[in-house]
Amino acid sequence: MSERRGGALWGAALRRLRANRPACLALALLLGVALLALLAPLASPWAYDSLDWRHLAQPPALGAAHWFGTDRLGRDLFVRTLHGVRLSLLISVLASVLSVGIGLAWGTIAGFAGGRLDEWMMRFVDVLYSLPYLFLVIVLNTLVGRGSIAVLLLGVAAVGWLTTARIVRGQTLQLKRREFIEAARATGLPTRAILLRHIVPNLAGTVAVYATLTVPQMILFESFLSFLGLGVQEPHASLGNLINAGAQEMESAPWMLLVPAVFLVLLLVCLNLLGDGLRDALDPRES
């Protein structure tokens, strides 16, 4: 019975999401950009690190060899920007999945256990909140190696799970007082089964919305680190180091800043619209 009711709720949420035109348009644009980032570089004769000495700092032109122009080294900005989109999305999505997974597990256990364990777990979260994330990334870069994708992934993921844990803990504190949880306890259902069968499924909507809204935060943080030179290193491209390079040439070659900045803004706007659409669709107060 509960499975049929859950399926009906998710079906109603999907119908509300389909009726939300901005969210559907944002999803279509996101899928289009992702496919473009995956497939377009394969069709281009240029690689992200290829040098074209005949076209240095060439402005964009549809009939030219480089549609989006080139940078000061003659590298194709179209291919480099899409390579940057692919790398930024990959790092941000993986970091979001990692941070949401850790935050979900941490917050669920803390909220359901309560008492001293809950207090100690949340004090640990408070301590991590007090640490400067930029300092943490610098230390990781020093210990492991500058520009390591694994270090960047861990550094970005360290930002997200703390807030997720707090949100999930608050939701779990409310859920564990509900009648169906008390009934599950009365039947002798083990704690692990209660968490997996009742608590986590009821948190799925909140977690899905927050995960969607976490990805743009991760993209911004990864771009910020790469802009400072602490993230993706040359010759690889991310939106952050492309914007950094473009900012240095803003007066003489504005397209070097404009092209990656437009893609960054497009990703952030689409992800936020999709997150808002999911939030409205999963709102139980909606009819």
Image: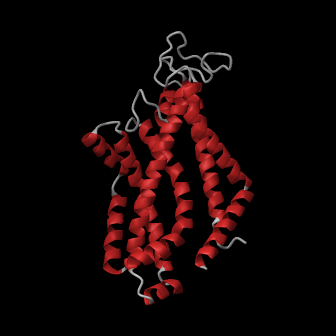
Residue 229 lies, in percent from the top left, at 39, 35
- Left or right of 268? Residue 191 is left
Residue 110 lies, in percent from the top left, at 38, 73
The answer, for residue 133, to whether it is visible in the render is yes
Residue sitting farthest toward the left: 143
Question: Which quadrant does the N terminus fall into?
Answer: bottom right
Numbered marks: total: 0
Residue sitting farthest toward the top: 54
- Is 219 above or below relative to 15? above
- Left or right of 166? Residue 32 is right
Q: Nearer the viewer, residue 103 or 197?
A: 197
**Residue shown at 51% from the left, 17% from the top:** 74
Residue 226 location, quadrant: top left
Q: How is the image coloured?
A: secondary structure
The answer, for residue 160, to whether it is visible in the render is no
**Residue shown at 48% from the left, 67% from the top:** 167
- Is 228 above or below relative to 119? above
Residue 151 lies, in percent from the top left, at 34, 44
Question: Which quadrant does the C terminus fall into?
Answer: bottom right
Residue 264 location, quadrant: top right
Q: Nearer the viewer, residue 171 or 230?
A: 171
Q: Nearer the viewer, residue 105 or 228?
A: 105
